[in-house]
Amino acid sequence: MLKYIITLLLIIFMNESFSKESKFFPFKTHEVVLENGFKAILIPVGNSGLVSYYSVVRTGSRDEWEEGKSGFAHFFEHMMFRGTDRFPGNVYDSIITSIGANANAYTSDDLTVYHLNFASEDLALVMDLESDRFRNLKYSKEQFQTESGAVYGEYRKGRTSPWSVAFEELRDMAFDKHTYKHTTIGFERDIKDMPNLYEYSISFYNRYYRPENVTLVIVGDFDIEKTKKIIGEYYKPWKPGYVMPKIEKEPAQKAPRFKEVQYDGKTLPLVIMGFKTDEFRATDKNFISTVSFADLAFGETSEIYKKLVLKEQKVQFISASPGMNRDPYMFEIYTMIKDEKDIDYVIGEINNTIEQFKKEKVTVEKLDRLKKNKKYSFLMALDSPDAVASILPQYITLANSIEVIDQMSETMMNLTPDDIVKSVNLYFTENNRNTIVLKGTK
């Protein structure tokens, strides 16, 4: 690990020098594109003897556009471990365990990602396993129904979290037409009906698990030319056939929306505010300003954090997350309040903070400190092959390329205080606001 970090530092300071002309992402990449549309991004780093292997499927809950069929992207996160004729699930698990690897997966709005970490000498074996299950997944109706029951159990478990309930209500309220209306796990009514949709599940797999919709990321200690060769060997036979989802555009919101939610259990009150913004745009200063605004207005060094968390101790925490999605989404502000009587006060402080940023410019010095902090934090977090690989799926999904990291960085580094003011006035309007207040039982 120490040797890897030293290598990273040499790359950063010798090749990057943090100059304006430098690229933000500090590693050289090699791209392989097969005739069937399958793409692999190879990033050799260090000599640790380790490899991280990420298969990025550009399909998430966003792509579940058919009525009554939400939850299938997340469902396949489960089913992909059921195996194939060559490597049934128990055989796959046994091999992964025998080589000391760990295999896992996650699903989000716009993507599903399968990832493994293992020793370099097992790369060909892992590629055989992974390419086989992506090309030849097979499961019985009984296995499908068993797993769909497990997914419903996962949904019910999630409902024990007040945050899960609050965000589900926010999405359902904020969106009318777009598939972002449902969370990644799906609507409860659809999950309950899932055991009856075996044939549909096969259709979902056949439409979305296709080579032109998947990007492979390999980071670590490996031979580039040998790896290119085995990629062709294992992934070239995969037949294309991706079918674009028919996602309906969300109409403009014309008035603020508010809902009070009663949580079936004890919890401190939660407030979530979501302001409609655009889809991810790496070169758009209006959009990228929201990323900086999240830290400036609601980060741990912000005035509202110092006031509500540290000084007055009205809330457990307050934070914000810019919506970086393939389609227009929301900028979310969320907090947990210690006393129910302070809900209106805290909401008022959030709105006051937004109004302040609409009128008053952040200082150049403060904005520059934030830029430097983000750049150094990003670079210094790249301390292992898995750390490098894990940041890439979101960008690959948003732009089908990791070059977007450099584009986004350049836009962010060129932001001015005027850009922040313009962005806040553009997005943080009354008509764009959605507010959820969740209260527990007493």
Image (spheres, rainbow, N blue to C red):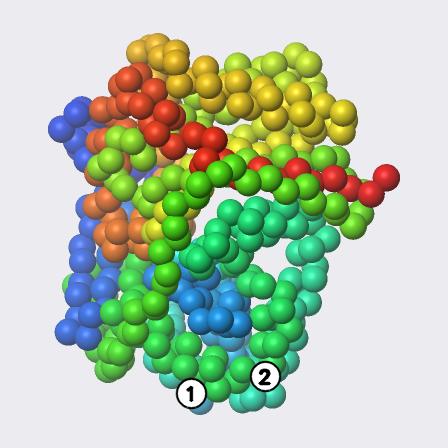
Determine the residue positioned at 26% across, 51% down: 399
How far across and how far down the image is residue 377, in percent? 39, 30
Q: Percent from the top left, x then y, of residue 438?
A: 69, 40
Question: Where 72 sits versus 83, above or below?
Answer: above
C-alpha span from label 2 to label 1: 27 Å
Assign a secondary structure to mark 1. Answer: loop
Residue at the spot of label 2: 196
Q: Which residue is drawn at 36% across and 80% down?
A: 206
Q: Which residue lies furthest to the front in this view?
A: 254
In the displayed structure, would residue 232 be above or below residue 227? below
- Find residue 374 and report its image quarter: top left
Residue displayed at 17% across by 25% down: 20
Q: Callout 1, which amino acid?
A: Arg
Task: Indicate the quadrant containing the N terminus: top left, top right, bottom left or bottom right.
Answer: top left
Residue 117 visible, this orientation: no
Circle 1 residue: 86
Left or right? Give the position of 135 relative to 441: left
Q: In this view, does 12 lie to the left or right of 158?
A: left
